[in-house]
Image (cartoon, rainbow, N blue to C red):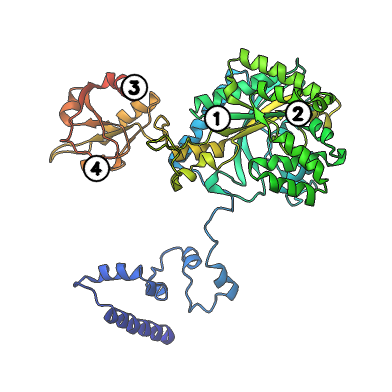
Amino acid sequence: MLLVLRRSLTRSHELVAIAHANPPRALVGPLTFLRGFSSSPSARQFRPSFAPRHRNRDRDQAHDPDPDDDTMAPEDAKASKGPVLKTPKGTRDWSGADMILREHLFKTISDVFKRHGGTPLDTPVFEMKEILAGKYGEDSRLIYDLDDQGGELCSLRYDLTVPFARWLAMNSITQIKRYQIAKVYRRDQPAIARGRFREFHQCDFDIAGVYDPMIPDSETLCVITEVFEALKLDVTIKLNHRKILDGMFAVAGVPADKTRAISSAVDKLDKMAWADVKKEMVEEKGLAEEVADQIGEYVQNKGTIAETMVYLKANEKLVANDDIKAGLEDMGLLATYLEALGVASSQISFDLSLARGLDYYTSLIYEVITKPTPPTLDADGKPVRRSKKEKEDPANQVGSIAAGGRYDNLVGMYGKKQIPCVGISFGVDRIFTILKARAEKEMRTREVDVYVMAFGGKEFDGMLPERMSIARQLWNAGIRAEFSHKVKPKLPAQFKAALDVPLAVIMGADESAAGQVRLKVLNQGKEESAESNNGELVNKTDLVEAIRKLLI
């Protein structure tokens, strides 16, 4: 007891000393001083003396351990600091307006999938490790392997395509249009500002089954154009054919055992200069320099489907190769079908450098990029040097925002029967990054459409039951609405809460008695008052219809 008293007296003297050393500017009461002191850096060492003992002792000690408590072990004291409050590298939390925008993306994309007869599918977030092994080429190092927790070696899924192929083989399904929206995981170097995460969503659409050449492929490309038209994003679909690519490598003299490694190097041409890609092929992959030069001559060509086909057919060595012949036949069919489906040739770039590093692709491959922001021109029509803001536009930095292709042999790796497939995967998080940065006006990101409020004179009781009733009426009609959770809220506070809400339903005693309310259009981003605009009197029975007209 004497020891505790001595400690308390010592601390009291120290507290007075601190108070004298930092005198308040004005005379304040003891509660005011203690509130200010409790948030000061000096308060931590005194906090246990002032902490009320009727609180949960375990909870208090977890955050503010008593340094004089001799019963606390050193390791407990160290652990009491708590974990670092952050999300793991390459991940993020989603909330509020971001969630609304993401849900808009999901709905827009899935609506297109459904129009094309897509059937939804969901698969486990982790798969047997052997299912994923050997399907992703050099990117296999990015797979997250899990510790053995029950006799099975598992890994987090890297994409949605391989699990889909496993599902087809496991269930002996030979024909389906399937879509899936789910998270995938890659142990990559993240760059969140550019939409590159370790945990991210993919939206996949695939057509499985035996059909005539290029018909499912052309519909898949049509799906791509419809999605980005709905999102109002101007994109280019880069495509190539694996047989044409392999044929060019063979003609150039690439050994068969180096084809996939060289293909992976060529795929980096959208991020690296040709000189750097050539250096990788020669110095790291062991390719002869003259062979690399020949590859460079081929793969640096691109244009419309018709233009690139003309280039390939003009080279006698290339058209003599059987793989290239087969690829050109496919591309001719594809061009015909795309025209019939209304896909403009200006949206397509037949790019001979596109390789797609995944091992399971067999013929047509493609990826989608946003068209770069056009340069600003001066009075003479000359491009103005890009500002820092233009250079940092995510549309110019995120890379591909969708990718896919045909994979005819993947399902056969898991079952007895080969089931040809073609599909597309949309990178939702990258698309989200672009849309959020551009803040398109037509994208609805608000959380509430209507705020229900009330006001009155001295006898005002808050009209809480009436506000609740109106809110329920709007909820039942599918209208997003809120009201203050105070019994007698002040009107300025209600307007402040409705700052970003487009409409307000304002209730008063007289109007309510007459079965009416006031419907007010709010000036978003500005503070409102009851006097600035009284709104329009509307019968309660007509309220839903009146609100819907204003929300269009």
As measured in the structure, the alpha-carbon distance from the residue carrying label 4 to the one carrying label 1 is: 49 Å
**Mark with earlier residue (4, 3):** 4
Residue that badge 3 annotates: 548
Task: Specify the amino acid type for callout 1.
Answer: Val
Residue that badge 4 annotates: 489
Look at the numbered disc 2 and give the secondary structure of its residue.
loop
**Mark with earlier residue (2, 3):** 2
Look at the numbered disc 1 and give the secondary structure of its residue.
strand
Q: Which quadrant of the view contains residue 449? A: top left
**Mark with earlier residue (2, 1):** 1
Residue that badge 1 annotates: 235
As measured in the structure, the alpha-carbon distance from the residue carrying label 4 to the one carrying label 3 is: 27 Å
Look at the numbered disc 3 and give the secondary structure of its residue.
helix
Residue that badge 2 annotates: 407
**Mark with earlier residue (1, 3):** 1
* Residue situated in front as seen by the camera: 516 or 17: 17
Badge 2 density bin: few <14, some 14–19, many ≥20, Cα 10 Å: many
Foreground mark, 1 or 3, reads 1
| Left or right: 283 as drawn, with respect to 176 | right
* Residue situated in front as seen by the camera: 138 or 520: 138
Percent x, y of residue 442: 41, 29
As measured in the structure, the alpha-carbon distance from the residue carrying label 2 to the one carrying label 3 is: 47 Å
Can you say whether 111 is above or below 89 in the image?
above
Foreground mark, 4 or 1, reads 1
> Which quadrant is the C terminus positioned in?
top left
Task: Specify the amino acid type for callout 2.
Answer: Tyr
Residue drawn at (37%, 85%), measured in percent from left and top?
10
Task: Specify the amino acid type for callout 3.
Answer: Arg
- Looking at the image, how many numbered discs can be counted on the residues? 4
Task: Specify the amino acid type for callout 4.
Answer: Pro
Look at the numbered disc 4 and give the secondary structure of its residue.
loop
Foreground mark, 4 or 3, reads 3
